[in-house]
């Protein structure tokens, strides 16, 4: 039994070519993974991977730290013209 299926879309409304699927139980997820591991859809092989167990709070903390670091740079408030923006 599925809990949630999410198909991300591009700005033009077409699908990006991947999906996120959540199952109700781990056992159902394992059986779904086994059943679909060698499946082809519209001539393409499905690539199925487990999601990582990264804690969302850790990711948010990292992003906040990075944003704070970026804002303390000497050139943080300056407007750049005709230059590429570099993300570190």
Image (cartoon, rainbow, N blue to C red):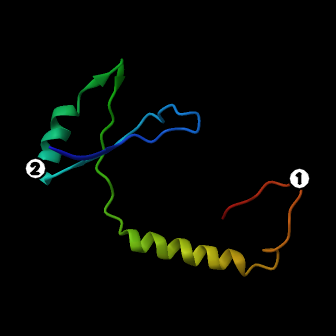
Residue named by callout 1: 82
Give SS at disc 2: helix
Residue furthest top in the image? 43
Which image quadrant for residue 45?
top left
Of the image marks 2 and 1, the number of the one nearer the N terminus: 2
**Residue 9: % across, % down:** 49, 39
Q: Residue at x 86, y 62 (%)?
A: 80
Please state the total of marks drawn on the protein image.
2
Q: What label does residue 13 carry, if any?
A: none
**Residue 47: % across, % down:** 33, 36
* Quadrant location, the N terminus: top left
Q: Is residue 21 left or right of residue 33?
A: right
**Is residue 38 or residue 31 the one in the foreground?**
31
Q: Residue at x 31, y 63 (%)?
A: 53
Q: Residue at x 62, y 74 (%)?
A: 67
Q: Residues within 10 Å of mark 2 (few under 14, many from 20)?
A: few
**Residue 48: % across, % down:** 30, 40
Which image quadrant for residue 41?
top left
Q: Please, is residue 68 above or below residue 54 in the view?
A: below
Q: Please, is residue 74 above or below residue 20 in the view?
A: below
Q: Please, is residue 36 above or below residue 1 in the view?
A: above
Q: Please, is residue 84 above or below residue 76 in the view?
A: above
**Residue 59: % across, % down:** 45, 69
Residue furthest right in the image? 81
Q: What label does residue 27 carry, if any?
A: 2
**Is residue 84 or residue 57 the one in the foreground?**
57
């Amino acid at each position: 039994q599925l809990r949630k299926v999410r198909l991300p879309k591009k700005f033009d409304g077409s699908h990006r070519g991947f999906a996120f699927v959540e199952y109700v139980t781990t056992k159902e997820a394992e059986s779904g993974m086994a059943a679909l591991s060698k499946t082809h859809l519209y001539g393409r092989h499905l690539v199925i991977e487990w999601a990582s167990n990264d804690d969302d709070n850790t990711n948010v903390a990292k992003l906040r730290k990075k944003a704070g670091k970026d804002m303390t740079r000497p050139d943080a408030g300056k407007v750049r013209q005709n230059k590429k923006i570099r993300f570190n």
